[in-house]
Image (cartoon, rainbow, N blue to C red):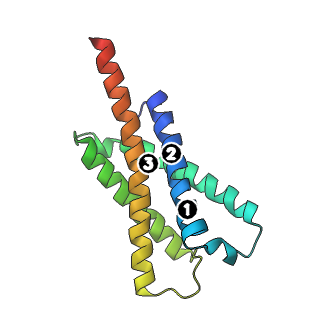
């Protein structure tokens, strides 16, 4: 059962912010891909921010979903959430051909998939951190 308490919202905002920061670092600074964008950069940043807010929300919901009800390990939930989210985002971007690179090769796609899984796994780790913080605080209050 999904509980929309402070740990849900904290995980949502932390994961969205963290993934957006990684995205900006990877594409904006490390690869310098933003120079290839064909429309105003402000639009791109706003659309990316909305995308990461939706992705962070989805990850927070997935983390607490019935699919994971029987999985007790937070680490396994984190790993699965990152893998599912990373693979899902990669597949969606590939299908609609959202890429900041002109020539897509198999090597490029493998690197992009690996990056997406890493980025979303870091977001899932932040969702986990918020749930773990809530667990610790609730446990301390019970004592």
Percent position (x, y) of residue 121?
38, 55
Question: Does dot 2 land on a helix, a strand or a loop?
Answer: helix
Tell me if residue 79 comes above or below residue 111 in the rendering. above
Residue that appears at 33% across and 33% down: 132
User: Which image quarter: residue 96?
Assistant: bottom right
Which residue was labeled with disc 3? 59
**Of pointers 1 and 2, the one earlier in the residue sequence:** 1
Where is residue 17 drawn, in percent x and y? Answer: 55, 47
Q: Which residue is mark 2?
A: 57
Image location (x, y in percent) of residue 22: 51, 58
Which quarter of the image is occupied by the N terminus? top left
Marks 1 and 2, Cα distance to the nearest angstrom?
21 Å
Callout 2–callout 3 Cβ contact below 8 Å: yes
Name the residue furthest front.
Answer: 30
Which residue matches tag 1?
A: 25
Classed neighbour count for the residue bearing mark 1: other residues with Cα under 10 Å, few (<14), some (14–19), many (≥20) = few
Q: Front-most of 89 and 28?
A: 28
């Amino acid at each position: 059962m999904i509980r929309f308490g402070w740990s849900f919202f904290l995980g949502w905002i932390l994961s969205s912010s963290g993934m957006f920061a990684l995205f900006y670092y990877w594409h904006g600074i490390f690869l310098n891909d933003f120079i290839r964008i064909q429309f105003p950069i402000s639009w791109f940043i706003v659309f990316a921010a909305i995308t990461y807010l939706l992705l962070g929300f989805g990850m927070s919901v997935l983390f607490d979903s019935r699919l994971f009800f029987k999985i007790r390990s937070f680490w396994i939930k984190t790993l699965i959430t990152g893998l599912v989210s990373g693979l899902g985002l990669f597949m969606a971007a590939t299908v609609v051909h959202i890429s900041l690179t002109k020539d897509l090769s198999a090597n490029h796609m493998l690197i992009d998939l690996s990056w997406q899984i890493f980025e979303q796994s870091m977001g899932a780790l932040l969702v986990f951190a918020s749930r773990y913080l809530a667990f610790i605080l609730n446990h301390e209050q019970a004592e």
